[in-house]
Image (spheres, helix red, strand yellow):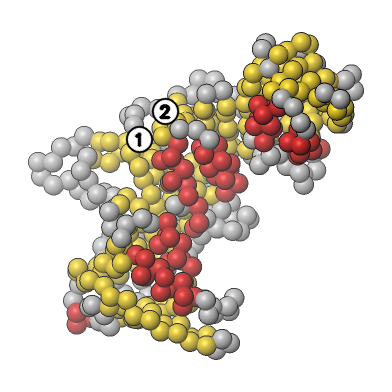
Amino acid sequence: MHVKIDRETLLKGVGRTLGVVDRRGTMPSLANFLLQTDENRVVISATDLEVSFRGFYPAEVEEHGALTVQAHYLFNLIKELPGDTLDLIGTDNSNLKIQMGDARYQLHGLPADQFPPVPEITDQELVKVESGMVKEMIEKTIFSVSADDLQYHLSSIFWERVGIPRHQPITEQPLEEGAEPEEDYWLRLISTDGHRLTLIERALPESGGFSIEKGILIPRKGMAEVIRFLAEEEHVSLGLGKQSLALKADDRYLFIRLLLDKKFPDYRRIIPESFAYRFAINRRQFFDTIRRISLLSTERFKGVILKLMPDHVEVTFNNPEVGEGREVVGLFMEQGEAEGLPMEIGFNARYFLEPLNAMTSDMVILEMNEKDRPCRLVDQTDPHYFSIIMPMSL
C-alpha cells in the first residue's frame, strides 16, 4: 500500500476512531483501525464490536493495500508532524511507514484479515433528520441512564417511533369528537435508572422509513459516539438493520449494535395518568435554590424536602454531618385544592437539577399527587419533554 494524503484529512478520519477503538480489550486488533485503499480515496474503519465507524477520505492512491494500526499512536504522531501531505507506505509485515519531508516513522500493525467485519448499509430504509434535533434528544435524556453497566436495559436509551394523532398531547388521551384522526410520526427517546424516567419526542420529517415501533435499545457508549457524530454534521440519515442502528452523513457511517436480548421496562405504566396538583415555578430560581441547598449533601445524605404551599415552595435540607438549610421560592398553583396543602415530599436533589438544567423555558410545571407518589417535571413551552421523579422516604 502506498498513498499520499492531506495531513488534516487523515487527522480528522483517525480522530473519529478514537472513541470507538477498544484500548483495554483482550483483542489487539480492536485497539487498531483498519486502513484500506479504494480507488482515489482511503477507507478508515474502527470497531469495538458494539460501536463501529467507517469513513471515506480523498487520497492519491499509488498502490492498493490494507492493514491495521493503533489509532491513538498514529493520531498523536500526525497531530504533531509539520507540513501538509503525508506519505503512507504499508510493508509486507503489515507495518505502516509515515513520511513527511525528512521525518520518517514506522508503526507496527496487524494484517487486515485479523480485523473484525464492520457493518454496512445494504437495503435499510433511511430517513433524513436534522442532526441538532437528535443530538438534543440524546443530551436531554442521557443523564437518567443507569450507571450500572450490568443492568443493560437501564444503562441504555430506548428509541421508538410512535404515531400520534395531530394536535394531540403527549398523554395520548382519546381524540375529542370531530378531531381529525391523521397521525404524525414522532421519534421518542426514554431513559430510566429505576429512580427517575425522562422522555422526549420530536416529529419526524418523513412518515416512511425508520420503522422502530417495537423500540430499540442503544447503550450509553453508543449514545456518546452518536453525539460526537452528530456534532460534525447538519443533517444525518437514520436507518435500522437487523442488528444495528445506522447513521449516515455523506461518506461517513456509524453503526451501533442493538441490545436485542434485553427488554426495556414498560414505561407507560410508570407515567401517572393524571395529577391532583399542578404548579408553575420559575426554572432558574428553582434550579439555583436546589443547587445551593445540595451543596450541603454527602454520599449518605442526598435528599431535599419540598414543602408545597399554594403560593410558594419551601426547600429544606438537613445533614447531621454538615448542617441544614432553608429557602423559599414563589410559585403559582394552577390546579388542586388548597385544603390538601402543605404537602412535604423528599427527593434526591440531583434528580431535579439535571432535568431543570436541560430545560430551556423560563417556567416549568411541577405536577404532584401524594407525598409517596412520583411527580412530573415538564418544560412549560415544550410539553413533549418531561421527567418523572420518584420520591424518597422522609
**Residue shown at 63% from the left, 38% from the top:** 51
Q: Secondary structure at mark 2?
A: strand
- Visible residue check, residue 38: no
CA gap between label 1 and label 2 equals 8 Å
Q: Answer few, some or many: residues within 10 Å of disc 2's Cα (few below 14, many 20 plus, some between 14 and 19).
A: many
Please state which of residues 116 and 79 is positioned toward the viewer in this rendering: 79
Quadrant where the N terminus sits is top right
- Visible residue check, residue 39: yes
List x then y, in percent, for residue 198: 42, 56
Report the amino acid beneath label 1: Leu
Please state which of residues 290 and 213 is positioned toward the viewer in this rendering: 290
Rendered position, 146 above or below 184: below
Q: Which comes sooner in the sequence, label 1 or label 2? A: 2
List x then y, in percent, for residue 352: 42, 66
List x then y, in percent, for residue 372: 37, 75
Rendered position, 174 above or below 332: above
Residues tagged 1 and 2 counted as in contact (Cβ below 8 A): yes
List x then y, in percent, for residue 386: 36, 56
Please state which of residues 328 and 334 is positioned toward the viewer in this rendering: 328
The image quadrant that residue 128 belongs to is: top left
Please name the residue that numbered disc 2 is placed on.
127
Q: Secondary structure at mark 1?
A: loop
Q: Answer few, some or many: residues within 10 Å of disc 1's Cα (few below 14, many 20 plus, some between 14 and 19).
A: many
Lateral position of residue 67 relative to residue 227, left or right: right
Please state which of residues 389 and 216 is positioned toward the viewer in this rendering: 389
Please name the residue that numbered disc 1 is placed on.
204
Report the amino acid beneath label 2: Val
Rendered position, 153 above or below 53: below
**Residue shown at 58% from the left, 32% from the top:** 254
